[in-house]
Amino acid sequence: MIKYIKQVVDPVDVADSVICDVCKKEYSFKGEEGMEAQEFQHIRVNGGYGSVFGDGAVWAVDICQHCFKEIMGKYLRDVTPIYSEDLAFKIACDLTEEGRSK
């Protein structure tokens, strides 16, 4: 015989959509817009002592990827990591090519 216990589950708020603070477009987490919603940038700034934002102040902004790129694009740097396996493979190939050219 299986003995069951009664479980009580508290309701939890689940995000349904997100609105860009710049362009005001709303993106649903469901359906085709789900990927757009996942690409949002959620930026939080905590002001420290002497900060221009105010000591202890907390500021937030949610920006869609399109507005983020438009506003910040010229300042962004590609810092995609080079994985050690890829780097080791490239070095091995380069060494092999050097050996062939001699």
Image: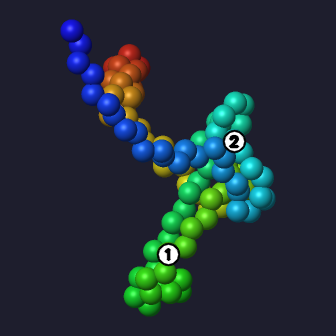
Say what secondary structure mark 2 lies in: strand
In this picture, residue 75 sits left or right of residue 97 = right
Q: Which quadrant does the C terminus fall into?
A: top left
Residue at image position (32%, 31%) is: 6
Q: Who is closer to the viewer here, 65 or 55?
A: 55
Three-letter code, disc 2: Ser
In the image, residue 87 above or below residue 26: above
- Is residue 10 visible in the rendered structure shown here? yes
Residue at the spot 74% in from the left edge and 50% down from the top edge: 26
- Label 1, on which residue? 58
- Residue 4, x across and y down, in percent: 27, 22
Number of labels in the image equals 2
Q: Report x, y in % for residue 13.
A: 53, 48
Mark 1 and mark 2 residues within 8 Å of each other at the beta carbon: no
**Mark 1 or mark 2, whichever is nearer to me:** 2
Taking the spot 37% from the left edge, 35% from the top edge, the residue there is: 83
Q: Is residue 102 above or below residue 55?
A: above
In the displayed structure image, the side of residue 3 where residue 88 appears, left or right: right
Is 31 displayed left or right of 52 in the figure? right
Image quadrant in which you'd find residue 22? bottom right
Q: Which mark is residue 28?
A: 2
Which quadrant of the rendered structure holds the N terminus?
A: top left
Q: Quadrant of residue 32?
A: top right
